[in-house]
Image (tube, rainbow, N blue to C red):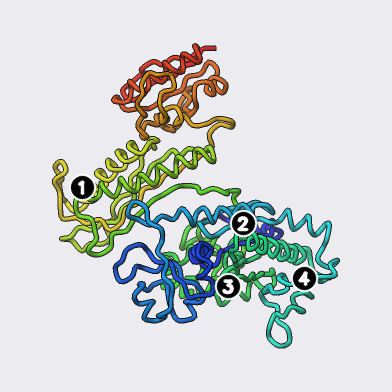
Amino acid sequence: MPVARPDSSGARIIAHVDLDCFYVQVEQRKQPKLRGLPTAVVQYNEWKGGGLIAVGYEARNYGVKRSMRGDEAKEVCPQIELVQVPVARGKADLSSYRNAGSEVVSILARKGRCERASIDEVYLDLTDAAEAMLAQTPPESLDEVDEEALKSHILGLESKDGNDSKATVKEWLCRCDADHRDKLLACGVLIVTELRMQVLKETEFTCSAGIAHNKMLAKLASGMNKPAQQTTVPFSSVKGLLDSLPIKKMKQLGGKLGTSLQNELGVTTVGDLLKFSEDKLQERYGFNTGTWLWNIARGISGEEVQARLLPKSHGSGKSFPGPRALKTVASVQHWLNQLCEELSERLCSDLEQNKRIAHTLTLHASAFKSSDSDSRKKFPSKSCPLRYGTAKIQEDTFNLFQAGLREFLGSFGVKTQGSHYSGWRITALSVSASKIVPVLSGTCSITKYFNGPDKFGSTSEQLPDNFIDAAPLSPSGSESYSTLNSTELQNELPGEQVWIEHSMADLGQLEMKANTWNRLDPSCSISKQTSGRSMVSFRN
């Protein structure tokens, strides 16, 4: 929970852009005949027509909800079009949605610092763009304002007939007597309008947006008027917004903290927090949380928009509800292998396209013991250094699962011997790669040398696709770790040493490749150091 910087946060112009029913829009772009029809996207499983994961607005008008199954949705709306999520490896394949989201991000990033929060959500810091517009073409100097901008909702602004009509919005945008904050906000309204129209033109997707002085308020505003609309929160309207906002609607207050505020302090709205001093909140919830609560009650947040167009992590997961719960080690290993294949593909794609490598592999699982109803005992998450290559990721993930399962069963007093243990059920599995960092500028992946056929005739066989021996371990001491080929390593690290991690079974292949490099570059040599690691050296 970041502690705000109230001195500077009021001058910022932050937008939260949310793509409307995004999965449905992606499918409608694929099949234009679906436009205007009640449509929903369903999970691939066939039980009761599959679970709805996205519902278009036309379908919502008939009472269709995301909590429904496909069969139930058809009962409510017989003419509904149900589109199944693409499937790969027995699970939903979201790559088409991720790629479509990237199209939108590339457009939004043209105007300011951009933080991709999810597949269909983006934060923008438009402060610099708004300051530039205010200096060059301030809104009050405009004879005409874009028609779409005049459709904006300005919180707290109402005309005599009770609506924020176009004339009233134009008057607010073009006021000469507005303070600096409101003038910047007016510029933000015009910039976001332009961006939304550009997204529609280039991608055919509509989006809604919230514009405010910080991320927290922008996020709240983006959901107020949907679809294809935008809402602005002037500083003067913040108190009115928060006074009546249910506490559970605020980010990070939907769980235990929100429940504690309700039960222990009688807080039902964010505005109710104004009754308590900062000292009182700090005394009960700790210094940082207490300060954060005091700040959000006043609409204060100093959380920065992080310059992030790419995801911080990659993950792949699958649920196994009810009778589909996994109960054998073999079935778990099968599904872990499927998840790891997808993860490995995404890691390789990220490496090739964005020159980034991940450092940490993490396994998450949900489980219960069939003979015990104590649901408070959770399957422990497990992590280890990430080794690139499908087979390596599969091997390490399965080892993490086995360690987690032993610990989970141990919490019930069950002692395990080998792989012979039963009485447990797995209801969800996910594997993720995190701590992603850029590779040195101008370098490329060593995978090209370990994945392709030997170019020098040492062998005619295609090297296995799992042979990517460049594990991104954390540097220690004077050792260097890299994912570069021989020539690039010498350019980047003359006279340096580079560790390459590998299995002993792959050592022969590694030596063969090093010999190939040596033919190209005599300064390259390899020496075995310890089991599972070798050093590639370059002489000055």
Dot 4 alpha-carbon crowd within 10 angstroms: few under 14, some 14 to 19, many 20 or more: many
Q: Which mark is residue 330?
A: 1
Helix, strand or loop under label 4: helix
Q: Point out the tag, 3 or 4, that comes first from the N-terminus.
A: 4
Which callout, 1 or 4, points to the residue nearer the camera?
1
Observer-nearest residue: 124 or 483?
A: 483
Residue type at numbered disc 2: Gly
Indicate the position of residue 74 as horizontal and vertical percent values.
38, 78
Quadrant in the rendering for residue 191: bottom right
Residue with the mark numbered 3: 226
Indicate the position of residue 499 as horizontal and vertical percent values.
43, 24
Dot 1 alpha-carbon crowd within 10 angstroms: few under 14, some 14 to 19, many 20 or more: few
Helix, strand or loop under label 2: loop
* Left or right of residue 278, residue 477 in this image: left
Residue located 36% across and 18% down the image: 529
Spatial distance from mark 3 to mark 4, Cα to Cα?
21 Å
Answer yes or no: do the residues labelled 3 and 4 have beta carbons within 8 Å?
no
Residue type at numbered disc 4: Leu
Helix, strand or loop under label 1: helix
Spatial distance from mark 3 to mark 2, Cα to Cα?
26 Å
Spatial distance from mark 1 to mark 4, Cα to Cα?
64 Å
Spatial distance from mark 2 to mark 4, Cα to Cα?
25 Å
Residue located 36% across and 29% down the image: 463
Residue type at numbered disc 1: Ala
Figure quadrant of the C terminus: top right
Q: Point out the tag, 3 or 1, that comes first from the N-terminus.
A: 3
